[in-house]
Image (spheres, rainbow, N blue to C red):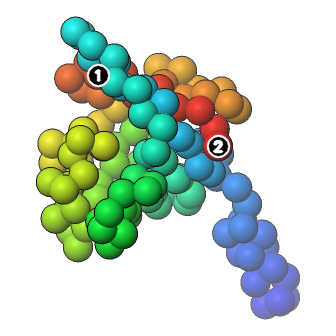
């Protein structure tokens, strides 16, 4: 009986999440009230409540990524960067445009190939599945 319970736990743990965000998303643009910022080297990776932000091809390499947790309630996603990565925010602000270690977005559009997240300050982040 305990082997059966163990197998069920393994299957549930290995099951892809139900929020549809799993995988790697390439940030394509950030739409502000007065301008559009094109992006092609920033990636958001989501899996099982953990996310990683990556700014590819930027020096120094140690600053290229940040890891944190995310949660979704209804149509809102909240992302929190782990404290040990917060110092990277200042160095990479021009790529991520995060003002602090936490951000909230409303999920405006989500499909298998595209994701639109509207930040609380009305900046629209547009992604494609990578």
The image quarter containing residue 65 is bottom left
Whether residue 89 sits left or right of residue 17 in the image: it is: left
Quadrant (top left/top right/bottom left/bottom right) for the C terminus:
top right
User: Could you say where residue 26 lies in the image, as x and y percent from the top left?
Assistant: 53, 40
Residue for point 24% across, 26% down: 120
Where residue 57 sits: x, y (%)?
43, 56
Q: Position of residue 1 (x, y in %)?
A: 84, 88
Badge 2 element: loop
Q: Is residue 65 visible?
A: yes
- Alpha carbon separation for disc pair 2 and 1: 22 Å
Residue placed most toward the observer, 75 or 64: 64
Residue that label 2 marks: 130
Single out the mark in the foreground, 2 or 1: 2
Work out whether 112 lies above or below 89: above
Q: Nearer the viewer, residue 16 or 96?
A: 96
The residue indicated by pointer 1 is 123
Q: Residue at x 72, y 67 (%)?
A: 14
The structure residue drawn at horizontal position 46% and vertical position 45%, both measured from the top left corner, is 41
Q: Is residue 82 above or below residue 37?
A: below
Q: Quadrant of residue 104?
A: top left
Tell me the crowding category of disc 2: few under 14, some 14 to 19, or many 20 or more residues within 10 angstroms, Cα based.
Answer: few
């Amino acid at each position: 009986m305990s082997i059966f319970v163990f197998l069920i736990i393994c299957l549930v743990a290995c099951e892809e999440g139900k929020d549809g965000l799993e995988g790697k998303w390439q940030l394509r643009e950030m739409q502000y009230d007065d301008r559009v910022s094109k992006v092609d080297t920033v990636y958001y990776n989501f899996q099982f409540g953990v996310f990683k932000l990556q700014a590819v091809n930027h020096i120094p390499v140690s600053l290229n990524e940040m890891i944190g947790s995310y949660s979704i309630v209804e149509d809102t996603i909240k992302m929190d960067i782990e404290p040990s990565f917060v110092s990277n925010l200042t160095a990479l602000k021009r790529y991520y445009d995060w003002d602090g270690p936490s951000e909230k977005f409303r999920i405006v559009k989500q499909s298998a190939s595209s994701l639109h997240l509207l930040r609380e300050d009305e900046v629209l982040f547009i992604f494609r599945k990578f």
